Amino acid sequence: GQFFVMMSPQEVLQGGTQRSIAPRAHPYSPKAEAPRATRDEKRRAQHNEVERRRRDKINNWIVQLSKIIPDCSMENTKSG
């Protein structure tokens, strides 16, 4: 393969000298975010709540329809 050098020839040929690197202004700290397990639990709980509301809404519409439709009783709605 080919090598591409991104420095000046003087820097490449002066292998024995150290280049100075600017010190960090502040120490490295990783992002402060919630652990994955906690975040996943929150997402799961929120999803469960949304699904529960959706099912309740559907069941309420079924009950309302069963009251409107003649000869429809609640015993028949569960069995199909």
Image: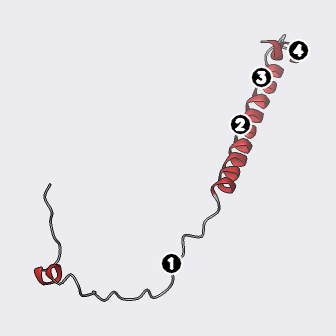
Amino acid found under the numbered disc labelled 4? Glu
| Tags 2 and 1 touching, CB below 8 Å | no
Q: CA distance from mark 3 to mark 2?
A: 17 Å
| Label number found at residue 28 | 1
Mark 2 or mark 1: whose residue is earlier in sequence: 1
Residue 59 location, quadrant: top right
Which residue is label 2 attached to? 54
Which residue is label 3 attached to? 65
Give x and y (percent) for residue 57.
74, 35
Mark 3 or mark 2: whose residue is earlier in sequence: 2
| Label number found at residue 64 | none
Q: Nearer the viewer, residue 37 or 43?
A: 37
Amino acid found under the numbered disc labelled 1? Tyr
Give x and y (percent) for residue 29.
54, 76
Number of numbered callouts drawn: 4
Q: CA distance from mark 3 to mark 4?
A: 14 Å
Which residue is label 4 attached to? 75
Q: Nearer the viewer, mark 3 or mark 1?
A: 1
Q: Where the N terminus falls, by quadrant?
A: bottom left
